[in-house]
Image: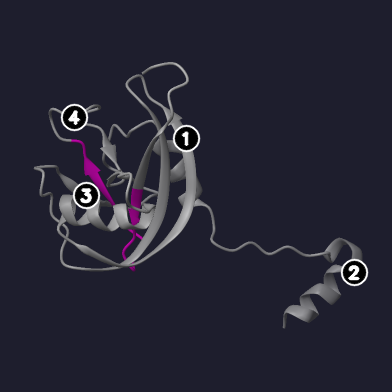
């Protein structure tokens, strides 16, 4: 990796089933970080948006067509071989059944009891974020009183 080189933009899918399990792919032999597990995705081409790249890459890699995805988080990560900007999307709807078109192994995982590994190092903060609750309650109960707060909830 050249110092101060611009990051490689990547579109990444967090493909989540209704039961909460998330799809991981093992990087195939011959690619950087072969044998490590990742969220599927790929490089964004110069003429496409992150969403367009996501749809294309997931079709190429997994043979499914995304029908609903929403932008989630973007993070930068420096590997020894490349500096990447990872554009994560939450994918909750698709057509087809995922299978590894590039010979990669796939596994649906419970994020609280994962059985695959090792994981790409960039995945650690993403998995942590996915384990957090979707909704938080924020109140002023300490100012208005707990009894009033609970009464207002009912």
Q: How many angstroms separate mark 3 from mark 2 (CA)?
A: 48 Å
Task: Using the image, determine if residue 20 lies above or below residue 127.
Answer: below
> Is tag 4's residue or tag 1's residue first in the polypeptide sequence?
4
Asked whether the viewer can see residue 147, the reply is yes
Q: How many angstroms separate mark 1 from mark 3 (CA)?
A: 25 Å
Q: How many angstroms separate mark 4 from mark 1 (CA)?
A: 20 Å
> Is tag 1's residue or tag 2's residue first in the polypeptide sequence?
1
Quick one: 32 or 154, which is closer to the camera? Answer: 32
Helix, strand or loop for disc 1: strand
Helix, strand or loop for disc 4: loop
Q: How many angstroms separate mark 4 from mark 3 (CA)?
A: 19 Å
Task: Using the image, determine if residue 151 lies above or below residue 75.
Answer: below
Disc marking residue 144: 2
Image depth: mark 1 or mark 3 in front: 1
Quadrant location, the C terminus: bottom right
Q: How many angstroms separate mark 1 from mark 2 (CA)?
A: 42 Å
Quick one: 18 or 6, which is closer to the camera? Answer: 6
Which residue lies under the disc numbered 3? 107
Disc marking residue 14: none
Task: Using the image, determine if residue 103 lies above or below residue 149.
Answer: above
Disc marking residue 31: 4
- Name the side, left or right, on which 35 lies relative to 50: left
Quick one: 44 or 79, which is closer to the camera? Answer: 44
């Amino acid at each position: 990796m050249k110092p101060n080189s611009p990051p490689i933009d990547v579109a990444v899918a967090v493909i989540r089933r209704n039961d909460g399990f998330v799809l991981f792919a093992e990087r195939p032999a011959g690619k950087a970080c072969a044998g490590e597990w990742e969220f599927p995705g790929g490089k964004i081409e110069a003429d496409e948006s992150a969403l367009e790249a996501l749809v294309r890459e997931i079709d190429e890699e997994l043979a499914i067509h995304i029908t609903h995805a929403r932008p989630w988080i973007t993070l930068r990560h420096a590997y020894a071989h490349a500096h990447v900007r990872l554009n994560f999307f939450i994918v909750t709807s698709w057509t087809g059944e995922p299978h590894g078109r590039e010979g990669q192994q796939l596994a649906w995982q419970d994020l609280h009891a994962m059985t695959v590994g090792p994981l790409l190092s960039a995945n650690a903060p993403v998995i942590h974020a996915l384990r957090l609750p979707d909704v938080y309650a924020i109140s002023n109960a300490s100012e208005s009183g707990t009894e009033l707060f609970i009464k207002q909830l009912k």
